[in-house]
Amino acid sequence: MGKKLIFQSFVGICFGALIAVLMYTGFYAAGAESFDAALFMKNSAASIFCGWFFSVGALIFTFEHWTLMKRTIVHFFIVTSLYFILGIGIGWFPLTFAGLLFGVLLFLTVYVLIWTGCYLYFYFQAKKLNDSLNA
């Protein structure tokens, strides 16, 4: 589990850094002439931390003695809590009803799409393995 945790941590940190760079590249391409260095560092660090806890949080799905429902619920509440604490603390979401509602709806949409994609991927992988064993 230790090697897997280190690997997942590395993947999450790199993914978070990539997202930060892509976001700021997009801002630059959209016409931003300059950036506030402190704001860049704050948002980049938050993105890296976010990538880390989503990646490490996915290790919950390796607990095969738990049902998929239990793993999904535990993962959902852990990453949702951390994401919104971070997002509100860093200023990604305004503390207004509309801002929080938009953030929740966007988060739920992305979470459901990623979860469904992963589920279908592993479902078809298992099906392919089972079909090759039965052939």
Image: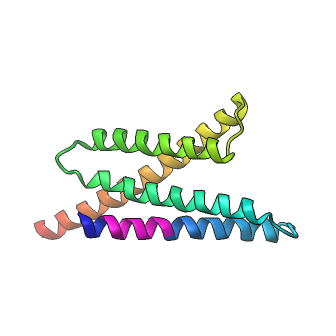
Q: Residue 3 location in percent, x, y?
A: 27, 70
Q: Position of residue 63 (x, y in %)?
A: 22, 51
Compare residues 112 and 14 and report the one nearer the observer.
14
Principal secondary structure, stretch drawn in magenta: helix
In the picture provided, is 72 more to the left or to the right than 23? left
* Residue in the image at 32% along x and 64% along y: 5
Quadrant location, the C terminus: bottom left
Q: How is the image coloured?
A: rainbow
Judge left or right: residue 74 versus residue 33: left
Question: Which of the 4 quarters of the picture holds residue 122?
Answer: bottom left
> Which of the image's four quarters has the N terminus?
bottom left
Q: Is 8 colored magenta in this rendering?
A: yes
The residue depicted at 69 percent of the width and 45 percent of the height is 91
- Magenta span of residues: 5-13
Q: Which one is nearer the viewer's eye here, 100 or 116?
A: 100
Compared to 47, does 25 lie above or below? Answer: below
Q: Is residue 118 magenta?
A: no
Position in image of residue 16 (x %, y %): 54, 64
Q: Quadrant of residue 100?
A: top right
111 relative to 30, above or below: above
Q: Height in image: 96 above or below 20? A: above
Given residues 135 and 94, the one toward you in this image is 94
Q: In the current view of this chain or complex, which residue is farthest to the top? A: 97
Q: Quadrant of residue 98?
A: top right
Residue positioned 29% across, 67% down in the render: 4
Query: Is 22 left, or right, of 59 in this rendering?
Result: right
Residue for point 16% across, 46% down: 65
